[in-house]
Image (cartoon, rainbow, N blue to C red):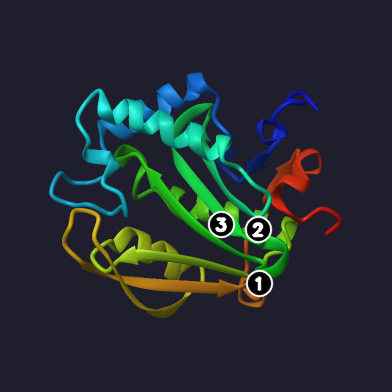
Amino acid sequence: MTHPLWPLFDLVIRTERLELRLPTDDELVALADVARVGIHEPDEMPFTVPWSTAPSPQFEQGFAQHHWAMRGTWDADDWMLNLGVFLDGSAIGSQSVMARDMAVYRTIRTGSWLGRSFQGRGMGKEMRAGILSFAFDHLGAVRADTEAFLDNARSTGVSRALGYVEDGLGQLAPQGVARPTQRFRITVAEWRARPRDAVEVIGLDGCREMFGIAGR
């Protein structure tokens, strides 16, 4: 173990091209720079909270505070893991996974973003597939949920390509105006029934208890 105070820093998920891991504070700077360059068109808002359009220095401070808060409020019964996504060692986006009472419900939720210059190359699908493999094959999850605005074709396209099924409509109002969303879910049986690429997970044993799955 190289991070005895916070063993989540030892957790690494590797797909064919990508590495997903908890970013250091220096890497948060690189991630913030990628996000600041652009994730979406100026007239779009794909997120529940409109953090991506905040002006400087609120953008940078809010970005860091969010990542620090998810570490500082971590609880085995209520956690959110914000992983940096790295391509050839460079930050390109973020893939999040979260759960409440994992040992009871065995259900996770996901969220993500990818710098615009890296979109359209299959990496959004690859990083989501990596986190689903982690959840289903290593955390013992039986269901994964996600949600996206109806006009967010990239996100809904990734969900459908990975085998998610529609799970009802919802509403969110990131900028004070309600907008319709599509909810999706995929079960472990549905996940395992489809062909999928190999995913390598390193360092889970040292932080297994932090996910509320000790002994699983």
Q: Nearer the viewer, residue 71 or 95?
A: 71
Residue at image position (39%, 65%) is: 147
Quadrant in the picture for the C terminus = bottom right
For residue 192, what is the image quadrant? bottom right
For residue 176, what is the image quadrant? bottom left
* Spatial separation of the CA atoms under disc 2 and disc 1: 9 Å
Please report whichever mark, 3 or 2, sits nearer to the chain's N-terminal start: 3
Name the residue tied to disc 1: 188
Amino acid type, callout 1: Val
Name the residue tied to disc 2: 135
Please report whichever mark, 1 or 3, sits nearer to the chain's N-terminal start: 3
- Which tag is nearer the camera, tag 3 or tag 2? 2
Amino acid type, callout 3: Ala
Task: Give the image location of residue 165, x and y in percent.
Answer: 47, 78
Total marks in image: 3
Residue at image position (59%, 53%) is: 131
Quadrant in the picture for the N terminus = top right
Q: In the image, is 174 to the left or to the right of 75? A: left
Pointer 1 local density, CA inside 10 Å: few below 14, some 14–19, many at least 20: some
Q: Nearer the viewer, residue 13 or 76?
A: 76
Mark number, residue 129: 3
Q: Are marks 3 and 2 in contact (CB under 8 Å)?
A: no
Q: Is residue 159 visible?
A: yes
